[in-house]
Amino acid sequence: MSPFDLLQEAARILDEKKAHNQRAIRITEQTIIADYFLIVTGNSTTHIKSLADELEHQLKEQHGIVPKASEGRTTGWILLDYGTVLVHVFLKDQREFYNLERLWEDGETVQLAIGEQPPEA
């Protein structure tokens, strides 16, 4: 599965679990750590854990893909590292505080093939 296809599949899975304000950023020109960031928001700690669990489960069951690392299960920011795609699952307050979109604003915003899209910058 290409990095772009993995990004889109992760966005679709998270959208089905009611993730909010999904934003994808292509970061290949800025860093070598990954090709894309996928940033999403959940409503509560239970919701963000559920989002992360469902993403891990679906990608493993449907595509045989497992994260290289998973961090932050006891915080308001869960990171799932799929190598080429880093998925950040935030509580709203944590997302606003860390503001990855601002830190990585030199990256290219990527259109996701899901219903909810972020407003244009």
Image: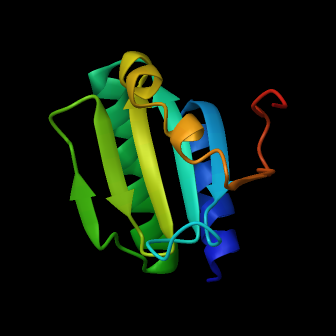
Count all numbered tags in the image, as a single digit. 0
Vertically, is 25 above or below 31?
above
> Is 76 rendered above or below residue 63?
above
36 sits to left or right of 79: right
Q: Is residue 110 above or below residue 7?
A: above
Q: Residue sitting at 65 percent across and 53 percent down? A: 25
Residue 85 is situated, as x and y percent measured from the top left of the image, at: 51, 66
> Dividing the picture into quarters, in which one does residue 20 lie?
top right
Residue drawn where x is 46% and y is 53% of the image: 87
Quarter assignment of residue 77: top left
- Please say whether residue 68 is visible from this viewpoint: yes
**Residue 12 in sight from this viewpoint:** no
Q: Quadrant of the C terminus?
A: top right
Q: Which residue lies furthest to the left in this view?
A: 74
Residue 21: quarter of image? top right
| Residue 110 higher or lower than 22, as above or below | below
Is 66 on the left-hand or right-hand side of 17?
left
| Colour convention | rainbow
- Residue depicted at x 28% and y 25%: 46
Counting from the top left corner in percent of width and height, residue 58 is at: 46, 61
In the rendered structure, the answer to whether residue 73 lies left or right of residue 99 reads: left
Question: Looking at the rendering, in which quadrant would you find the N terminus?
Answer: bottom right
Q: Nearer the viewer, residue 93 or 107?
A: 107
Report whether 49 appears left or right of 60: left
Residue at image coords 42%, 75%: 83
Horizontal and vertical percent position of residue 33:
43, 72
Residue 118 percent across, percent down from the top left: 75, 31
